Structure formats: C-alpha cells, structure tokens
Amino acid sequence: MNVELYERVWMWAASLLIAAFLGTILAMTAFHAITPPSHFETVDPSNLAANPEFGSPGVRPGPDGGVVVTVVAEMFDFSPNPIEVPAGRPVTFRLTSADVIHGFEVVGTNANAMAIPGYVSQFTVTFPNSGEYLIACNEYCGLLHHNMVAKLIVKKEAR
Amino acid sequence: MSSRNSLAAAHLGVGIAAFGLASAMGLIQALSLADIQFPQRSESLYYMSLTAHGVLMALVFTTFFIMGFGYALAQVTLGRVTGRRTAWFAFWLGLVGTALAAQTILRGQSTVLYTFYPPLMAHPLFYIGATLLVVASWIWGGVMIASYRSWRRENPAVPVPLPIHGMLATIIIWYLATTGLAAEVVGMLIPWSLKLVPTVDPLLARTYFWWFGHPLVYFWLLPAYVIWYTLLPRAAGGKLFSDPLARMVFILFVLLSTPVGFHHQFADPGISASWKLAHTVTTYAILYPSFVTAFTVIASLEVAGRLKGAKGLFNWIARLPWGDPFFAACALAMLAFTVGGFGGAINAAYAMNTMVHNTAWIQGHFHVTLGTTVTLTFMGVTYWLLPRVMGRELKFSALARLQPYLWFLGVAIFSASYHIAGLRGLPRRVYSAALSGEYGAEWHGLTRVAAVGAVVMFLSALSFLIVVIATWLAGRRTDTASFEFAVPLRPVTTLGVWDRFGVWTVVAVLLVAAAYAYPVLNLISHPRFGSKGFQPF
Ligand code: HEM
Ligand SMILES: [Cu+2]
Ligand SMILES: [Cu+2]
C-alpha cells in the first residue's frame, strides 16, 4: 500500500498516543490496583426480606478496620437512609436492588455503581473528607426516578 | 446522470419525519429538566417523551436514513438495486413495526427508554415492533449485498466503488451488532412480555444489549465517514487523498466495533475486571481508524483549497466553500467529532468513567457525537441528495446555509452545559434537575443554559424541516444535478487485501466470539435468580 510520508508519520503518532492512553490505564491497574467493580454474587431479589444480610441493610464493622454498608435500592428509596460512615477508612458497599435496575451515585465522589436485581455490587471507597453527601439514583427506574435520593454522612472519628 | 430514486426518497423521508417529531420532544425535555414550567409538564410526559425521543432519534431516524442513503448509492455506483420489490416490502415492514412500537410509547405503555433495560417491562408490541424494524434493516442489508454480488459478476476484477465498500462494512457491522439484540429481544424479552416465561436475567439482557449498543454507534458513524471520504472532497473541489487507507479504515471498523461492549458496563457486577480491561484495549484500538480518517479527510480538503490557489500553511481553509450547506454541515460535524472523540477516550478509561457514568456528561457527549457528528452530516447530505434523488432544486437556500451553523451553536451551548453539570454530579434521565425538590444548586443554572442551547437546536431543526418539506413539495424540477464522487489522487485499479470481505467477516466473528463467549458462558453457568416484570409508569 502506497502511503504518503506525512500520513505515515501521523499514523505512527496516533498509534503512540493510543499506546500511551492504554499504558496509563494498564499501569494504574498493575501498580495501584485500580480496577472497576467486578464482584460476582447472586441473591434472590423477590425475597430479600428473608436474606440474613439484605433483610436488614445497615452499617457494620468491616474486616479491614473500615465498615461494610449493606444497601438495598427499591423504588424509590435507598435503605438505610441516612448512611453514616467514618472518614478516612475503607467503606465497602454491598448493594442490590429489590425490583428494577437503579444507580447508586455519591455525588462528588467516585462511588458510582449499578444496583442490578439478582446481583450484589460490591466496591470499596475511602471518603477523606467529612460532611454530608447526596446519594442519587442515576438509572431510570420509573416515574419518580428523580425523587430517589438519600444522604451519606461522613463523620470525623472521635478518637 | 439523472438518478431519481423514489425508494431512497421514501426511506429518507421517514427518517427525517422521525427526526422532526423527536426534535420537538427534545425541546420539552430540556425545558423540563431545567424546571422551566410549561403547560402539561409532568413526570409521565417527561419519561414518555424521553423514550420516544431516544427511540425515534437513535433507532428510527438513523436506520431509515442509512437505508435510504444505501439505496441511493447502490443505484448510482452499481447501477442497480437488485430486488426492488423486496426492498419496498422491507420499507413497509419497517414502517409498520415503527408505528406499532410508537403507538405503545405514545400511549404511555412502554415508558422504558430506548435502552429498555429489564426488568422494566414494556408492552409486547414495543419489542415486536422494534424487531420488525430490525428485520426490515436485515432485508435492506440483503438487498444491498445482492446488488453488490450482481455487480461483481459483471465486474470480477476491479475493486468495488469506495462508497459501497463503506456501506458493505456498515452492513456487516449491523449484522454482528443485531445478533446481540436478537438474542436479547427475541430470545428473552418477547417471550417474557407475553408471559410465556416468568422471569429474565437483567444482567444477561444488559450484556446482550451492549453487544448491540456499541457497534450501533459505528452503524451510525460509518455512513457519515462514507460521505466525508467519497462526497465531501468533491463538493469542496478536491480529491480523495488516499483510497486504500479508506478501505483499511472501513475493515478495521468491521473488526473492532463489536468486541468492546463492556465499556458500557464498567459499573456492573458479574463481569470480571480482566474482561472489562480486555474490552478497554479494543475500545482504544478503535480510536485508530478514526485518527486515520481525520488525516485523510482533512488532507483531501487541503488539496481542494490548494487547487483553488491557496498558499501558505492555513490559507486553504479560507478557500473552502463555507457557504455551501453540505460542506459547512460536514466540516462542523468533524469539528464536533474532535470534541466527541476526546470525550469518548475519557469515558473509556474506567477510573474516569466512574466520575461521569450515568451523569448529564453522557447526554452532553452523545449529542456531540450522534446528535451532531452524525446528524449534521446527514442533514448536510440531505441538501446534497434532494436535487439528486428527488430531482428538485433546493428551496430557501439561504435558510439552508444558515442552518448548520445554528445547529452547531445550539449544540455547543447545550452540550458544554451538560458536560459540566455531569462533572458536578447531575444524574442523567431526570425529570427535574432539582431531583426530589431541594437539590441542584451546583447545576441548576447550567441546565437553564442548556435549555437555551436546546431552543437554538430546535430552531435549526425547524429550519432544516422547512427546507426539506418546501423542496420536496415545491422545488423547481431539475435534471442537471449529477451524482459524482471524489476521485482519488492515485486511483486503485486492482483488488487488494482490504477488498476481501469474506475473510474479514470471519475474523470479525471470531473476535466477537473471543470477546463474549467466556463472559457470557460464565454468567449463564452460574446459579442466578431471574426478575419478573415491573411497570412503574
Ligand atoms: C432539537 C434537538 C435536540 C434536543 C433539544 C435534544 C434534547 C435532549 C434532552 C434534553 C435529552 C434528555 C437527557 C436526559 O434526561 O437524560 C435528550 C436525550 C437523548 N437524545 Fe436528544 N436532543 C436533540 C436532538 C437529538 C438528536 C439529533 C439525537 C440523535 C440522532 C438525539 C438523541 C438522544 C438520545 C439517544 C437521548 C437519550 C435518551 C435516554 O437517555 O433514554 N437527540 N435529548
Ligand atoms: Cu432511579
Ligand atoms: Cu460504546
């Protein structure tokens, strides 16, 4: 194939740019263990009340010195609400839905995952700053989707 | 060469009508989101109209337009559309399917949005109607391939004309994509909505949906690339810089556009991080053919400017026909794509994706890409096509000249606002930016600015419709507009490696299998719980 010199230069430059993008992502994965949520666990959405964990959502102490927060999304509420967690410690969310797909977005942080009925989404976040955060459902779930909000309270620990 | 073509015109007409209707809905959505009161404003109107807008824009406008454009190209470059009656049958099938689905949406029975994620359950006719539209598009693909084969028998040794090369790539991508859609809709949702099966697995359905959803993007984009490569340089007075690279680009899209769907599911459970990473690699790889396209197309336009006597480094830009609505629309569409491509590279990096996933950033993003790069190119080529497939001179050409600039201005205001609002956390698909009432101080002002952009976009859409309708009904008859394509700087006369569609299709199928077989098998071999349907609308 006959390719002009300038175009050849451009094609190499484009390849390098793409390699740089990918290299950054791979490096973050390899050295900082930054990966998307990928937990695989199923749960019966039609009978969450009988589930020992999701039947009573709430905040519990976690194994890593942080807390585990079990959250159920259900048209058009999150429980528990409000959610209280300590600042500066790992917070592991375990999230599912009792009906349709919902989103769980803690506005202004990088906690953002889907609540899919039948599955448990699990991800760990550390909130360095204390304060009140808005939790918003960010997947359409019915006519009152926009009303589906909750509060996250991040507390400085009294030592 | 006169090329009046009622088959093409009928498809383009339906597509444009869908676009017109959906534009009005877009405007009321933008107002509602910004909490600007208007009569009849309600939650049910908002989400119903959002469903209609998404379906009409993303699925109906694009599909009909692309089918019509394909027929116009086949007629002119291959000298035939083999199976005209079958083609008309497909047209009516698609129209009936669209009408069936649309009436359930307008009645509020299918307020599930254009992504229709179960366990939200629409009316069965929503799924059945959509299936008929897809079947119609499959028949279209068959007619296009039959036309190509018939031409090939008479022309065994020359490369297929570049526009058809691009359309064949589009069609292969479409078949790969809609296999996933069929698995979801025919295999799961239709029986479920008819109560033949009690439950479906929402995650499996989502996975099939995004198997379809990303190549869908290239189904929209490739016809725009065909226009930029094969029509635009000619309209600008230039030549196609490189013909074989264009063919390479189309084949790379065939290979890479489907095995990437997990980049829409970064926030989903049930799919392992390493598979998400694998799809990330292919997602970035697919930037490559677009980079090559940028060079070839811009170089072709530079040739045009220099042929017109431009000197110096940038003077050729000024020599381009900015007053020609076809040229201006395409050039602005490309400009939008530089922004859109940048946004896409951000979305594809999962760490950054977390910040923007399902926020207003996303609607900002796809109104730049689909809503401008593709749509503005289609609007521009409509001005170019009308005299050629309808045999009518453009009416209100001054309005047509203004229209692309108006759209670009509107979208710039609209999308910039939503991008920023999304970074500040505004969720997408909400009736009101105040959410349950008291939120949104950080983004409320931005949604009002976006509403201004929406008004400008709507005025542009209206201008487009006025020009099209006036031309269609009352344009002066003409037979002089000729259907000619850009000539390559160095024409290619022998078949090359990029012309071997059979082989590339096999490779593409293998890549799709590699990308999906293991994750899907892993999912379905795990004990899972299905979901019954919900209709919270
Ligand atoms: C007059 C021009 C337009 C206006 C004012 C407009 C406005 C809007 C607004 C306000 C939304 C709602 C966003 C949300 O709540 O999440 C939206 C969604 C959408 N628009 Fe547009 N839009 C226009 C043109 C287009 C075009 C030309 C296309 C594509 C060809 C398009 C495709 C979409 C899609 C696919 C959605 C997503 C629907 C969903 O989230 O389910 N729009 N539009
Ligand atoms: Cu919701
Ligand atoms: Cu995608």
Image (spheres, rainbow, N blue to C red):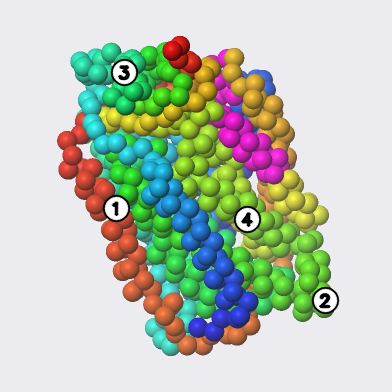
| Amino acid marked by disc 1 | Tyr
Between discs 2 and 4, the one toward the N terminus: 2
Instruction: Work out whether residue A95 can be spotted.
Output: no
Chain letter for mark 2, please: B
Label 3 within 8 A of ligand 2 by Cβ: no
The residue under label 4 is B338
Q: Nearer the viewer, mark 1 or mark 3?
A: 3
Residue at coordinates 21% horizontally, 17% vertically from top-left?
Answer: A52
Q: Is residue B282 magenta?
A: no
Relative to B70, B198 lies left or right:
left
Task: Give x and y (percent) for residue A5.
Answer: 61, 80
Task: Give x and y (percent) for residue B47.
Answer: 50, 28
Chain letter for mark 1, please: B
The magenta segment is B410-437
Assess disc 2: are there few (<14), some (14-19) or many (≥20) residues with their C-alpha within 10 Å of its C-alpha: few
The residue under label 2 is B311
Q: CA distance from mark 1 to mark 4?
A: 30 Å
**Circles 2 and 3: CB distance less than 8 Å?**
no
